[in-house]
């Protein structure tokens, strides 16, 4: 499994497993499937309400803690009490430390993300988190954060898939030493049926999902596909061995359409999450 080095030297498996929309009651079983398939990087969030299931799967797996990379995220409604919220997440996961903790959304209307970051910096200094980062941060949110930050975010987890690539934001992150992590990397399934993807898949006897994941990996992006299906999650994991030519990569890059499927971080609030 390819690993990337974050800006503080911590390594992260480039391909992880996302559990957004995995029901709490199914999470342990599905994460156990993912760990058995070889995933060592799991992406959850307090807002997904399935941290306990992730923790139960980790405990049941018997995999040494240091071989795992676990990410969770601060709820939007708890940006004013990040330290307490982090402890609740850590306990739900049953872990002594978390590998990566992210501000889930900037929620600019709340005006609290800089305060949350300051609290996360203290948790990072106290070694309860190995790396801290952000999610859904647009250029202006990064600028505001960096004016006040002592620690540059290790990661910005943003919506990236062939039809919505945010290339300018991704380039800015990389220039600042912030790793780009693609959420909804398959466009929640909507990017799988394009002609260009199908053509490359046929040429390699691979699946469309493997082609898209190989495209992300070739770009140096961290990628966290979700599948609740044991066959598909294995198929996705096998994308690490698929290598595409420059022309094939360019044919996927050409699918940009500018249409996001998630919410606009400039206005999204979700403070009930
Ligand atoms: P994905 O792009 O990972 O797509 C998931 C969908 O694709 C599911 O419907 C899944 O169905 C289907 N799928 C997965 N693999 C295959 C395959 N090989 N063939 C066909 N269909 C497939 O979308 P997500 O939105 O779930 O994003 C992934 C992760 O990113 C989340 O789980 C979460 O961890 C993170 N995320 C973070 C956000 C944030 O705000 N920070 C927002 C959204 C996501 P099935 O399960 O039936 O296989």
Image (cartoon, helix red, strand yellow):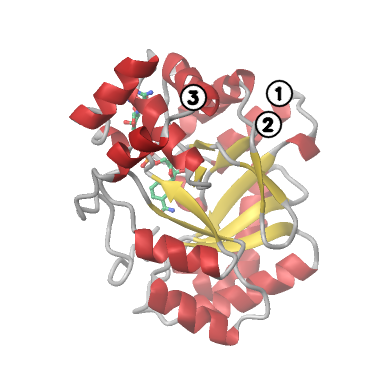
How far apart, in angstroms, are the residues tagged by discs 2 and 1?
5 Å
Apparent side of residue 12 relative to residue 262 in the rendered image (left or right) = right
Foreground residue among 159 and 65: 159
Residue beneath disc 2? 58
Do residues under tags 1 and 3 come within 8 Å of each other at their CB atoms? no
Between tags 2 and 3, which lies in front?
Answer: 3
Disc 3 secondary structure class: loop
How far apart, in angstroms, are the residues tagged by discs 2 and 3?
28 Å
Q: Quadrant of the N terminus?
A: top right
Q: Is residue 115 above or below residue 182?
A: below
Residue 61, which numbered label? 1
Do residues under tags 2 and 1 come within 8 Å of each other at their CB atoms? yes
Can you see residue 60? yes
Q: Residues within 10 Å of mark 1 (few under 14, many from 20)?
A: some
Residue at the image point whose x is 59% and y is 35% from the top: 54
Residue 242, which numbered label? 3
Q: Quadrant of the C terminus?
A: bottom left
Q: Is residue 16 above or below residue 269?
A: above
Q: Quadrant of ligand 1?
A: top left
Q: Pick out the residue farthest to the bottom.
A: 147
Residue at the image point whose x is 41% and y is 26% from the top: 210
Disc 1 secondary structure class: helix
């Amino acid at each position: 499994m390819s690993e990337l080095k974050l800006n503080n030297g911590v390594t992260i498996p480039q391909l992880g497993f996302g559990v957004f929309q995995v029901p709490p009651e199914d999470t342990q079983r599905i994460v156990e499937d993912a760990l058995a398939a070889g995933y060592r990087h799991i992406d959850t969030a307090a807002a997904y309400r399935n941290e306990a299931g992730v923790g139960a799967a980790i405990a049941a797996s018997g995999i040494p803690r240091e071989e795992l990379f676990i990410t969770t995220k601060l709820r939007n409604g708890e940006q004013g009490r990040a330290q307490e919220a982090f402890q609740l997440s850590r306990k739900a996961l049953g872990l002594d430390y978390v590998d990566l903790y992210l501000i889930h959304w900037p929620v600019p209307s709340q005006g609290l993300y800089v305060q949350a970051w300051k609290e996360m910096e203290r948790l990072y200094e106290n070694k309860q988190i190995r790396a801290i980062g952000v999610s859904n941060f647009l250029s202006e949110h990064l600028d505001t954060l960096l004016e006040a930050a002592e620690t540059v975010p290790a990661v910005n987890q943003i919506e990236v898939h062939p039809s919505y690539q945010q290339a300018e934001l991704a380039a800015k992150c990389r220039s600042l030493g912030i790793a780009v992590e693609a959420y909804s990397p398959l466009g929640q399934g909507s990017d799988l049926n394009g002609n260009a993807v199908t053509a490359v898949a046929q040429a390699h006897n691979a699946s469309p999902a493997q082609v898209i994941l190989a495209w992300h990996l070739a770009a140096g992006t961290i990628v966290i596909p979700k599948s609740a299906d044991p066959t598909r999650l294995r198929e996705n994991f096998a994308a690490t061995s698929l290598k595409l030519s420059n022309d094939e990569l360019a044919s996927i890059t050409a699918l940009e359409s500018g249409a996001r499927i998630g919410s606009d971080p400039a206005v999204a609030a979700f403070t009930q999450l």
